[in-house]
Each structure stands twice: as structure tokens, then as C-alpha cells.
Image (tube, grey):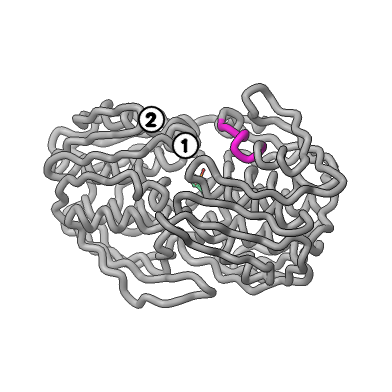
Amino acid sequence: MTDRPPPQPATARRSPALTGHLRVPGDKSISHRALLLGGLASGETRITGLLEGDDVQRTAEAMRAFGAQVDGAGDEWVVRGVGNGCLLEPEAPLDFGNSGTGVRLAMGLAGVYDMVTAFAGDQSLSRRPMGRVLDPLRLMGVQVEATPGDRLPLTLRGPKTAAPVTYRVPVASAQVKSAVLLAGLNAPGVTTVIEPVHTRDHTEKMLRGFGASVEIETGAGGLRQIRIEGQGRLSGQAIAVPGDPSSAAFVVVAALIVPGSDVVVENVLVNPTRTGLFDTLRDMGASIEMLNRRNSGGEDVADLRVRASELRGVTVPPERAPSMIDEYPVLAVAAAFAEGETLMQGLDELRVKETDRLASVAAGLKVNGVDCEDGKDWLLVRGSPGGRGLGGGTVETSLDHRVAMSFLVMGLAAESAVTVDDTGMIATSFPQFADLMRGLGAEIE
Ligand code: S3P
């Protein structure tokens, strides 16, 4: 298990209007997939805009251990892949740190190979459920030796030949869908994933881009069937990773709640499977304009102009959860500044993120004077326009980068300062967060 470095607390204070233009780092989901598929494909994959956060670096390291050549930093990353079906057996356990996406997708990619692969992670990742990916892999013939409860650390031993499956994903999870599709790449015949709820679709899109044969059918009630033909050739691609909407979310909410703010976040991914937060904030009365909408490498991208707005509470329906699953912590912060009540429903998956995010967010709100209630899968926040009476607390982040960033955003507009007990994990997804925010005028120290 990864050693835990000493905590790095930080405090955010009520700030003057935030202004300026900025870019947030590359999308985390697309960055992982670009390295995984680039490392698998034949030939060269050139990636610009890759997120260089710790989570993605772990995936780069894992692909090196599988035999791919992964070079770069900064402007362009170059990956020379091994060719589909040709991953090598790693010499040592793969340590994915804090990264649920990295470990679950890599288990799908490599678990079905006729070899032994060991996976590990930090304290937070070792508490998260892996059975959701191990179950379909078992059906494909993989033998699993895991820590009780199907947790990390664990070892996978693949069969001589993997069995293609038809698998209905039991939870709304792009990671599970993706793991099965990636496993299907190394099984003869057609592997089918049935997805009752449409989750982020970057894996399907990118697989097609690399030349895999993927068919998608959407039936009654939005049920999607995704079929992948195994053992085909994948060829290296040029990939431009757009800005991460889940990182832009913090800047957007900060600009909405700090009076007088006017900020443009350039080059943000606006794939409709990812924009639930922006839709919800607009329902709340937020001024968010999508400027210069364009297509970049198969994904929708736009510049977001955000101006401080008076927000009103809304009810966020459970169907919206998959398109904003990582954004509830920061939505809860926006709701704390809105007039009236905001009810968020269908949040069961928040319980199994980097921490139990429903519990952590509710605790962080309460310690900062926010009137809120939470249940098994819902959160109700009663707002305090202008941030009156809010702040003054220290938030326990429990190794969760998004909890840390959300409450620092809260401190920028609350009456009293907000402290978070550790900011170290922010480097997993948004290493430049504090510097970029300070560049807009935010007081974070
Ligand atoms: C991700 C899927 C989501 C999300 C995570 C990234 C992905 O997880 O929370 O941050 O890249 O596929 P689930 O699949 O568990 O919902």
C-alpha cells in the first residue's frame, strides 16, 4: 500500500471578485483511456493536453510495466504500444495510488490475459469495492485472489482463452462498462455490455477511433447495448485531450458565488454525458454561457463564461446523477449560497467514491454552519444567500481531492474562512488548482 505523506492543510478566505481567463488541465477520464489504448495499440499514439496528475501518472507507469513505451511531459506525450493481445506480464504489483478509474480499467484490460497481474492502491482505494469489475471478469474465466470483500490488494490470473460475455452492468458505472469492453478486446468473438443508464461514453468513442469494431444500439427507455468484436487490430492515434469539466466545476462554482466575478474557462469538454452540473446550475439561475462550441477530436468542447449569479434552490432528479456524479460536492457548496432548498437525489454511488462523499460533504457543510440533512441516498441543503453565517470550520477530507477543492471554494465566499485538513490529494486530478485560483484573485493559503 502507498505510504501516506504528511497532511498539507489550507485555508480559503472571502475574496474579491474573481476575474480572468484560464484553462484547466486535461480531462482525467480521457487521459487514462488515451494511455491505456495508446499503450495497447500498434504504432504510435501522440497525446496533447494530457492531465499530468498523480492518478494518470500511475496509469502511464502501469502501461510501461505491460511493455509499452510511454514518454513525455508537458506539451506532447508519445506512446508506443505493444499491439492488441500482446501485453507483457508485469514484474511487480501495479500500484494505482488513489485512482479508481486507473485500477478498474487496467484490471479489465489485462485481467483476461493468460498471465498473473497484481494490483494495489492507497488506503482510500483499498476500501473501495472492486467486485463490480471482478464479477464480469470471473465470468470471462479470470481467477481472482482478493482481500476479503473483493478489495485491493488483489491478484488476477487470466485463462488460456477468455470467454466473451454479455454483461448487464448492475450499477450506473462507466468504469465497469469500460472494464468489460476492454476485457472484450482480448476475447474471441463479440462481448456485449448492456447499460441501463447512459454513463460517460469516452471508452466507446475512443475504441472506435483506434479502429476497434464497436456497435452501439439504444433501445426503449435509453437501454444501450454496446458490442465489441475482440482480437481486432488497434492503431495508434493523435489525441487532443480537452479540459476536464469536473475540474472546471470548481472554478465555475467559485465564480458564481464570489460577488462581481466574471471568468472564462477555455477549452472545456462539454460531452452531454458530463454536463449535468452546468445544466443544474443554470436551472438554479447561474449565468454560464457556452462560447465557441466546437468539435475537437470527436468530443464537444466550449469556452465557459461564468458571471456571479444569485442562485435559487432546485430539486436535482436521480436520472441526472451519472452525468454529474463527481460534481455533487461542489454543487452542495453552490446550494449553500442559494436562496431556498436544494434536494439532490439518487446519490448511492457517492458512498463508494474516494471517500463516502455523501457523509464527508454533509459533515463539511455542518461544521461550516450550513443547514442540511442527509439520508441513505439524498442530501438536502438550505442555502444562505451571500454566505451569511457560513464558514469557520475545518473539513476532514479523508483522502478525497474533490472534497478538499469544494470546501476551499466555499471559503472564498463564506462569511468566515474555511480550512481543509489536507490538500495533498488535489494533485491526483488538478495539481494547479490553488495557483490557478489565486491567479483569478482567490485568497487561498
Ligand atoms: C469515471 C467514472 C466514474 C467517475 C470517475 C471517473 C471514468 O466512476 O466517478 O471519477 O473515467 O470512467 P463510476 O464508473 O464508478 O461511476
Query: Which mark identifies residue 400?
Result: 1
What x and y, as percent, mark residue 265? Answer: 36, 65
19 sits left or right of 156 in the view = left
What's the residue at 58%, 39% (across, down)? 98
Name the residue nearer the viewer: 172 or 95. 172
Q: Residue furthest top?
A: 148
Give the extent of the magenta segment. Answer: 128-134
- The image shows residue 261 at horizontal and vertical percentages of 21, 59
Rounded to the nearest angstrom, the CA distance separating label 2 from label 1 is 9 Å
Rendered position, 339 above or below 251? above
User: Which image quarter is the N terminus in?
Assistant: top right
Q: Does dot 1 land on a helix, a strand or a loop?
A: loop
Do the CB atoms of the residues marked 2 and 1 lie less than 8 Å apart?
Answer: yes
Q: Which residue is mark 2?
A: 360
Identify which amino acid the numbered label 2 is placed on.
Answer: Ser
Image-based side of 424 in relation to 73, left or right: left
